[in-house]
Image (cartoon, rainbow, N blue to C red):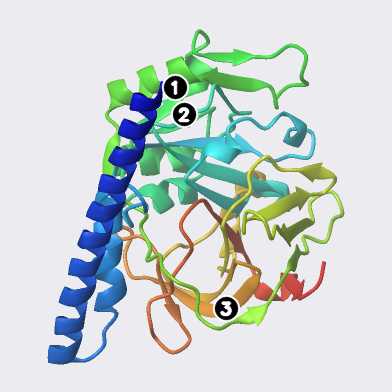
Amino acid sequence: MRFPSRLFAGMCIVFVCATGALLLSAATEANRSEDASGYVGLRGRNISDVLSRLNLLPVGTRERSLFSLIVENHEDARPYHQGLAEALLIQEYPVEGFITRFLLTFDTANVPALLGPVRSLRPYFVDTILPWKTPILHAGGSPEAFERAGSAGIAAINGLGLPKEFVRDDGIPAPHNLFIDHADALTLVKKAGTANIRWPPYDTGGMQSRSGALTIYIDYRNPAHNTRYTHDVFSQGYIRENGITMSAAKPMNVLILEIPIESIGEYGRLSIPLIGRGNALLFRGGTVERARWERNNLDKWFTFKTLDGDSLTLARGQTWLTVIPSLTQVEWENAF
């Protein structure tokens, strides 16, 4: 048994030496670039590129096959949430009654066993995914949402017309009991044509010097809907509590955009314009940074800038983006 152990040890030594040689080469090249043009972060970038090729560090962006899903967030639905932890991006918007609803975006390579409770479509959910044109799974929707999806060429897959794929759990009160499983979701979205997108759609990188923010509060004027995030020092993500329910998702970024509600229409449905600019807050790694969002047309997604005009950098991992009418609803403190 000694020979295999020695062989394994030898292989490890070779790998470490090869890695060291590549790192030294990258560092040398970075120093040459730095001498020639001044420091612009080339040293870190070159070494990161080498580590990425060795699978020791995740690549910043890569192409992913994406689809989206509408999930209910009524307080009666929260205990039955399925799939939030696996989403790449969770976008949270107010709906009628001023509760919120989620738009989840998934990579087809990482789909959970069960998804839901699935809920109805609104026009602003269509607007936010227009740059990617991901197929979207939902259960019904407003006439404006169907019209918007049709004119934009979005594959809106309505679960109310697909009873074999979208199944109700009789043990959960309707309408918060409609789910779809992994296999059926993949079959439907691949048939519709998933979107191959470079992900993430924002810059990621190191954290700048920011103010501490270990606990975040979002006030919806209702204890059943108020939200609290607590920074987890071990994962560097955030533990989310919505009313009395703790979420399975633990986002690395909590990004809050201030977007006013333009009007309230028939049946209390909201009009939320997603073109324009406004204020934002980014929470990551137990810190907060004030920022700005901008979107000039629906063919491009949001861009995010610091107050100095630099690109806002987010952490790698899941982002939870929340749209609220006013940032005065948000408070934070540098304490647990």
- According to the image, label 1 marks what residue? 185
Question: What type is the residue that disc 1 sits on?
Answer: Ala
Residue nearer the viewer, 292 or 250: 250
Q: Position of residue 36 (x, y in %)?
A: 12, 90
Q: Position of residue 309 (x, y in %)?
A: 39, 86
Q: CA distance from mark 3 to mark 2?
A: 32 Å
For the residues labelled 1 and 3, say whether their Cβ atoms are less than 8 Å apart.
no
Q: Classify residue 96 as left or right of residue 106.
A: right
Query: Is residue 153 among what the camera can see?
Result: no
Q: Earlier in the sequence, mark 2 or mark 1?
A: 2
User: Closer to the observer: label 1 or label 3?
Assistant: 3
For label 3, the SS is strand
Q: In this picture, is 85 found above or below 176?
A: below
* Dot label at residue 111: 2
Question: What type is the residue that disc 2 sits on?
Answer: Val
Q: Earlier in the sequence, mark 3 or mark 2?
A: 2
* Dot label at residue 289: 3
Query: Is residue 330 among what the camera can see?
Result: yes
Q: Position of residue 123 (x, y in %)?
A: 47, 47
Residue nearer the viewer, 110 or 222: 110
For label 1, the SS is helix
- When asked about the image quadrant of residue 284, the answer is bottom right
- The quarter of the picture where the C terminus appears is bottom right
Assess disc 2: are there few (<14), some (14-19) or many (≥20) residues with their C-alpha within 10 Å of its C-alpha.
some
Q: CA distance from mark 2 to mark 1?
A: 9 Å
Instruction: Pick out the residue farthest to the front.
Output: 2
User: Closer to the observer: label 2 or label 1?
Assistant: 2
Q: CA distance from mark 1 to mark 3?
A: 37 Å
